[in-house]
Amino acid sequence: MSQRQLAMVMDLNKCIGCQTCTVSCKTQWTNRNGREYMYWNNVETYPGEGYPKKWQELGGGFDEAGDLKAGVVPSLQGEYGVPWDYNHEELANGAQLKPHVDPKWGPNWDEDEGAGDFPNDNYFFYIPRICNHCTNPGCLSACPRDAIFKRDQDGVVLVDLDRCQGYRYCIAGCPYKKIYFNPRISKSEKCILCFPRIEKGLPPACAQQCVGRIRFVGFLDDEEGQVYKLVKKFKVALPLRPDYGTESNVYYVPPTEAPPKFDANGKIIEGSERIPPEVLEKLFGKEVHEAARTLRAEMKKRKETGESELMDLLIAYKHEDMFRLDNNYYAEYAKSKGMPVIKPVDERYLSGKYTSKMKFFTKGANA
Amino acid sequence: MKTLKTIIVLMSLLGLTSLMAQSLNALYVKEDLSKVSLTSNVWQKAKEQSVEVYPQTTIEMNDAELIKANEANLAKVLHVKTLSDGKSVAFLLQWNDKTKSLQTVQSTTDYSDGFAVQFSTVNDKLPYIGMGSVDRAVIVHLQKATGKVYEPNNGGDVYHQVNASNQNAFAKELTSYKNEVAKQGNGDYQRAFIAEGFRSLTQIRDNSEPSLMEMKYDKGVWSALLVRPLKSEHLNLQGSFPVAFAIWDGEKKNRDGAKLLSAWVGVSLDANAKALALLDEAKGDASNGEKLMMENCSACHQYKSVKNAPNYMAPNLSNIGGYANASYLKESIMEPSAVVVPGYNLNAHKNFLWYTSDDKGVRTSTMPPFAHLDEKSVNDLVAFMKTLKVEVEK
């Protein structure tokens, strides 16, 4: 358990599936080094199979007794899809442009397909997904090497690349399949919540670049912060698949704003819900109904009175309000630990805790 | 060879002690072993001895496909030759494996065949087999059959690890780029580790435990070589010393704890070396031990068909006789906190934690000491526990 927890809220009513977040992450962290197939951030269409394919059916997470459930490691060929290149060099010789493998799956493969019959009751919405930096991470629990750790200062979950030996139990253990095996270096890698950025008071790249301003970032115990207000005060931001038992720290404002259904004559069915409530309940748990009620009530209140703190929060007028990262928090934390004040990179992530002399079982080393 | 097989079959039918080696005799040779290879003629002089390796069952890992692939897991026989030139010790291991598995850079689900040889840094007490234990560290030499592997932390040359398609390089330029990338990958995944218990395995990067390793697959048989100095920073091997072997089958998605593991066996560097007292097998009445085990142990431990205890209550002992030595079993009964095996899941089974930690990180096992048992009962229990093991693959 970390001392504080940094969390992210994503408002799904505002996500337009533009993939700007995906690109900002991909170009910053995962465009090389055996990470070509990795999407630490991806945006998938729901209903859809997602990335990796059918991730919700690949196991992992915890059972009711708190024991790890068995999971599987997705394959590059089947579930992720081999990232393909084109034969650009051959074009000058008259060849036709073609991918170097026969593509079978990839991120965004089923983009905008959704479900239902157009135009009567078809629907889809977008879910951007990153590592949830869980309070009870399945990856951390499954690692027999103590190579995954949750940072004390902010709860960011990281892989110690020095200790990781590429066993991949973490991937089986993460029910969101948001930890990836890098076959080129034979180690696991994952979203680092852009910790080198947040330590300088900057939000993660995916959040900063988001054109829909759907992402809020802040500490869960910061009562003035928008994250606290959305998650704890108004309870409209909910974790994805809470039934996995990992206590995820990325929260979603569920999509509530879809048009009503049409009947056979093309007329509006009053009071109908285009996104079936059971679909939302599967994703966000039973609390989704109360969250939707709150959202609708606040919207109504805004229309009638012009006042609603929740609507003001969700409109996200100012970028600086959305990312309350306590600019001086990391500097103060470093000072209290006797660390150099500017510490943009986590030392353990870079160099591990390798030592040729064994004295591991000291306080804190195996907490 | 045929006669030997007949004798083994007859003896196992009669329930007699197996012929497997408790002690490996290293043949002294004049040749410089630091240059020996798998195909060196010097191996022809050495006598082949057999060591059984058993599936480690203490902890079930969370990989569904691994669990399925290992349902019918059997023990295997390792054929071992041992040499010494007075400065180094060399082991040649051979085992049957119908499938050659290589971990490649194009797959997330390939696992490699591999082997490890383990040495104890202490000689008065045996460390926990497989991972060592506090104040009883082990040195592990590991080799895995992998494709080219790149080190993320050491080289620091990120430029040459960029996808070739992302380069503004063509023709000869691109070829030299690709050659440089290929050069940076190490084909052989060889590592030396030091460990003081579960979760402590740590790579030794300063070459203070040097080794020469080789793995070769031919017609269904893996041959593997390890040569290392008798003296190094952590080890001073002389007379007789304990050693243990492990092998991994990539086809069965084996890695880490999912392996076949031997008990500690003694290596004698010369004929006059005193056998290791630590490796003495307990003599006891196994049938009385079985009764005692049911009375004293089965409420918490599962073993074979005895499943009175809930899953994860305590380590599963189904194969304990295959890879644990009598002295370790005895110690674990009398002083359970001497070696504490952690569960695989840091956050689970809160109702029956296997140990508690004090603020200095010292672990106390939740198993009470059974020091009140008389010596005969303990010997009987150990004799029974030594029978807890699966069949050896034919």
Image: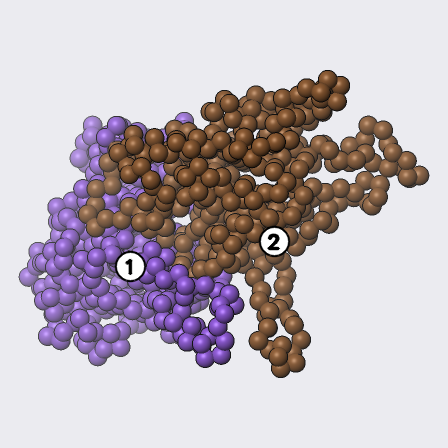
Quadrant of the frame with the N terminus of chain A: top left
| Near-viewer residue (A360 or A314) | A314
**Percent x, y of residue A13:** 68, 36
Tell me which chain appears purple.
B
Looking at this view, is A135 or A339 the one in front?
A339
Q: Quadrant of the C terminus of chain A?
A: top left
**Amino acid under disc 1:** Arg
Q: How many marks?
A: 2
Q: Position of residue B385 (x, y in %)?
A: 29, 43
- Residue at point 13%, 61% (across, down): B230
Chain ID of residue with mark 2: A
Name the chain letter of the residue that bears numbered label 1. Answer: B
The Cα–Cα distance between marks 2 and 1, rounded to whole angstroms, is: 35 Å
> Which is closer to the viewer, label 2 or label 1?
2
What residue sits 41% from the left and 39% below the top? A200
Question: Disc number at residue B191?
Answer: 1
Q: Callout 2, which amino acid?
A: Pro
Q: Is residue B352 left or right of residue A115?
A: left
Q: Image height check: is B62 above or below B24?
A: above
Residue that extends furthest to the left in the rendered view of this protein:
B272
- Between A47 and B279, the residue placed more toward the observer is A47
Q: Is residue B34 in sight in this rendering? A: yes
Residue bearing the label numbered 2: A107
Determine whether A358 is above or below A283 in the image: below
Q: State if disc 1 and disc 2 touch (CB < 8 Å).
A: no
Q: Nearer the viewer, residue B96 or B112?
A: B112
Residue farthest toward the bottom in the current orientation of the protein? A93
Q: Is A249 positioned to the left or the right of A10 in the image?
A: left
